[in-house]
Amino acid sequence: MKILAVSDQELGLIYSPQIKNRFRDVDLVIGCGDLPYYYLEYIISTLDVPLYFVRGNHAYPVEFGSGGSRSAPWGGVDLHRRLVRDESGLLLAGIEGCLQYNAGLYQYEQLDMWWMVFSLVPGLLINKMRFGRFLDIFVTHASPWKIHDLEDLPHRGIKAFRWLVQVFQPAFHLHGHIHLYRQDAVRETRLNRTRIINTFGYQEITFDLDAWMDSGRQGKKNPGAKWRAE
């Protein structure tokens, strides 16, 4: 399975006819926030693949364009506070926004984030009983606590996200929010069995779901989770 994960920065490579050839083998698109709805719509309509997304702290409640107004990208599935099983069998969940730092939308206190994460736990337990694993991909805008985050309030990591990853160990935690401008910036960190990836701009991820499920049954480390950044 090839996944295109995007966040925070619009790119000419993607928002152009080049996308058809450059990403022709992508099976799934994941949006980690702070991208216009029209941009996400262009990606999925051109590639003709599913989109799962969460909103970032700079999202608008309504976006107006030539096609009319919308409160979400047409054709996309909002993962916020939801657990979703894709038709491929992939298990996804997500939380939008970042820490509260002004009166803007999609901002929450650490306590709010804990409450939203805990609300996912019953569904995660049901996933384990039904499918043999809790979660494959956790999608957020903000980063987890002390992983890829910064010291200023808007960009501090979320304690509840780190707890979820440590306890339920999905294959991936994909996030945005932290802008990267240096070639040597850290994009990927491993926490137990989980690869935590900053998707700023875009990231291509190859995920062998069968190998991942098998590794869980055998207690192996994460052989099904491979990623490539370009």
Image (cartoon, rainbow, N blue to C red):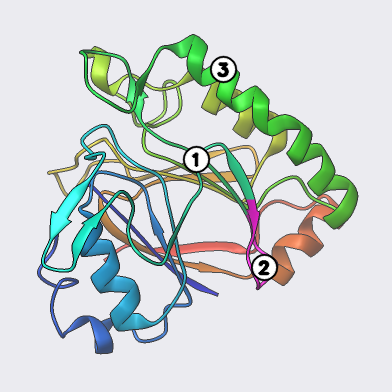
**Is 155 situated left or right of 3 in this image?**
left
Q: Nearer the viewer, residue 204 or 63?
A: 63
The correct choice, above or below, for 82 with respect to 163 in the image is below
The correct choice, above or below, for 134 with respect to 4 in the image is above
Q: Cα distance, mark 2 to mark 3? A: 28 Å
Mark 2 or mark 1: which comes first in sequence? 1
> Residue beneath label 3, please?
114
**Is 181 situated left or right of 208 in this image?**
left
Q: Secondary structure at mark 1?
A: loop
Q: Cα distance, mark 2 to mark 1? A: 23 Å
Q: Answer yes or no: do the residues labelled 2 and 3 have beta carbons within 8 Å? A: no
Eye-nearest disc, 1 or 3: 1
> Residue beneath label 2, please?
209
**What segment is highlighted magenta in the picture?**
84-91
Mark 2 or mark 3: which comes first in sequence? 3
Q: Answer yes or no: do the residues labelled 2 and 1 have beta carbons within 8 Å? A: no
Q: Residue at x 21, y 14 (%)?
A: 103
Q: Residues within 10 Å of mark 1 (few under 14, many from 20)?
A: some
The correct choice, above or below, for 13 with respect to 199 in the image is below
Q: Residue at x 18, y 68 (%)?
A: 67
Please tell me whether residue 86 belongs to the stretch shown in magenta. Answer: yes
Q: Residue at x 19, y 42 (%)?
A: 180
